[in-house]
């Protein structure tokens, strides 16, 4: 059975975590406003994913501008691990900070969107260093088992 179901890598786990946190933020915010509701999960997931995508695009655009300004070739991301990991952490921190600041639990989706945008933009900047670090970490853990 283990061969049938592949093991998720860090980017896929971050993607699913980003969707889960955005969906939970949508459910909680919708439940605060309208009573218990599940139909607000999809807009929360979609808006959070859109915020992460736009943040990653902004981060890569700024990175290419800075590299071109210094006379280097533009960076073309292959694995995109950095902005997905940054987007997940940004979503988590943005939602938690909105929970801490908001007295009634409102605007949780806004916190997750802004967190995803900032996290993905900051995660896109060191993107070429993240994938080799993750692969070396995977090599170290595979030696132990």
Image (cartoon, rainbow, N blue to C red):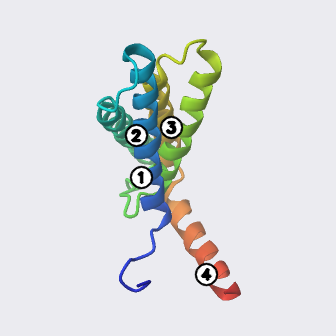
Q: Distance between the residues labelled 3 and 1?
A: 11 Å
Nearest the viewer among 132 and 27 is 27
> In this rendering, does residue 132 appear at all?
yes
Q: Mark 4 points at which residue?
A: 139
Residue 3 in picture, x, y percent from top left? 40, 86
Tell me if mark 2 has few (under 14), some (14-19) or many (20+) residues whose alpha carbon lies within 10 angstroms of its own: many
- Residue 52: assigned label: 2
Task: Point out the image quarter for the N terminus.
Answer: bottom left
N-term mark: 4 or 3: 3
Above or below: residue 38 compared with residue 33: below
Q: Mark 3 points at which residue?
A: 91
Nearest the viewer among 35 and 12 is 35
Q: Distance between the residues labelled 4 and 3?
A: 28 Å
Is disc 3 in contact with disc 2, using a CB cutoff of under 8 Å? Answer: yes
Q: Is mark 4 on a helix, strand or loop?
A: helix
Tell me if mark 3 has few (under 14), some (14-19) or many (20+) residues whose alpha carbon lies within 10 angstroms of its own: many
Q: What element carries label 1?
A: helix
Q: Distance between the residues labelled 4 and 2?
A: 29 Å
Q: Is mark 2 on a helix, strand or loop?
A: helix
Q: Distance between the residues labelled 2 and 1?
A: 10 Å
Q: How far apart are marks 3 and 2 (CA)?
A: 8 Å
Q: Mark 1 points at which residue?
A: 15
């Amino acid at each position: 059975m283990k061969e049938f179901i592949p093991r998720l890598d860090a980017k896929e786990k971050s993607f699913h975590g980003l969707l889960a946190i955005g969906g939970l933020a949508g459910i909680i915010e919708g439940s605060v406003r309208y009573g218990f509701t599940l139909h607000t999960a999809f807009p929360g997931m979609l808006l959070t994913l859109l915020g992460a995508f736009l943040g990653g695009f902004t981060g890569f655009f700024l990175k290419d501008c800075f590299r071109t300004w210094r006379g280097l070739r533009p960076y073309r991301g292959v694995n995109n691990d950095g902005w997905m990991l940054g987007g997940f952490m940004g979503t988590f921190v943005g939602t938690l900070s909105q929970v801490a600041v908001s007295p009634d639990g409102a605007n949780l989706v806004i916190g997750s969107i802004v967190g995803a945008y900032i996290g993905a933009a900051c995660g896109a900047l060191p993107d070429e260093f993240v994938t080799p670090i993750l692969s070396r970490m995977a090599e170290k853990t595979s030696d132990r088992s």
